[in-house]
Amino acid sequence: MFRSNDQWALHRQSEAFRATTTQLSLLLVATVCATLADHFDSHVLTALSALLYGLTVVTGVVVQRRRARAHWQAHRDAAETVKSLAWQYMVHGGPFHSEVPDPDGLFNQQLEEHLRGLRRIGWQEPAHGPGAEPVAGALPGSGRARNTLWDPASRREADDPRHPQITRSMRAVREKSFAVRKDIYLRDRVIEQLSWYGSRAVQARRSAAVWSALTALLTLLALIAAVARSAGIASGWDLSGLLAASAATGVAWLQTRRHHPLSYAHALVREGLETQRAVLAQSVAEQQWPRAVSDTEHLMLPQHTDWLARFGG
């Protein structure tokens, strides 16, 4: 379930970004044609501009019906939910503490409770990845580092058909001693995620700086073009509208990718994980371990990242 949802999330994410790119490109090219048609008094360019604006409207209707962004988020939430529950099951975290009488049954129960809400909004469990085998080592979040515990080469089908999401490797980790489970969780979950969130925060911050600078430059050029035209300089060209449309396209793309809020959210998640890493490594006894793991997993849920991103926009 994790692998198929992860692949569908990546597929829907790419579809959503392609759709937005197509819409913005059509709008920008239509504006270019309109500017050229006004300058050269060309009926052909005017008709082409109108056609492109019409295609933009059609593309918007198709995008609304496809609901790629909504499906992307639903599959991502499902993949992260399965992964988080699997880690808690393996290391005796959260509700899967050492004294629980039936951890396998509890796993199925917890998974069903988490997925019930996603089903209400239209999520359906995919049988396989979109058109291809899932990518080896793919982890939630598009491009996360390879993790050997989740390498398909090290996993086999579940040995109990009643619990199809519980693999042999998950059972093997759960059977290990507290010290070994603790070391595995810190090394292969917390530290790996620390690296991922740190790199994503830096990447988002750089992208936000580039796009912000570009839109600011285009806006300044639009202002200069407007002043120059009002002063009678280069009166034959009306470039202010084209430059303003280009700046608006940059702003729309920046909002679509959410570079600013995500850089803020990822940085905060990394700070929280660094604090939890220190707590888990030094001061958590086995009795407090389930609660500490649950708190750590909460930091990595997509819903928590989205909540933080709202304050970073």
Image (spheres, rainbow, N blue to C red):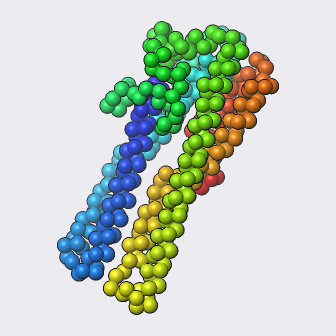
Nearer-the-camera pick, 88 or 182 = 182
For image coordinates 59% across by 46% down, the residue present is 201
Kindly give the residue lying farthest to the bottom in the view shown. Answer: 232
Give above or below for 56 relative to 116: below
| Quadrant that contains the C terminus | bottom right
Residue 22 percent across, percent down from the top left: 34, 55
* Residue 204 image position (x, y, % from top left): 55, 49
Viewer-closest of 218 and 69:
218
Lateral position of residue 46 relative to residue 93, left or right: left
Does residue 168 appear left or right of residue 26 in this picture? right
Q: Is residue 271 above or below residue 187?
A: below
Is 289 drawn above or below residue 269 in the view shown? above
Asked if residue 189 lies left or right of residue 255, the reply is right
Residue farthest toward the left in the current orientation of the protein: 44
Q: Quadrant of residue 55?
A: bottom left
**Circle count:** 0
Residue 289 at x, y = what percent? 73, 22
Asked if residue 307 can be seen in this view, the reply is no
Can you see residue 204? yes
Residue at the spot 64% in from the left edge and 30% down from the top edge = 191
Drawn side of residue 127 relative to residue 39, left or right = right
**Residue 129 rendering spot, x and y as whole percentages:** 37, 29
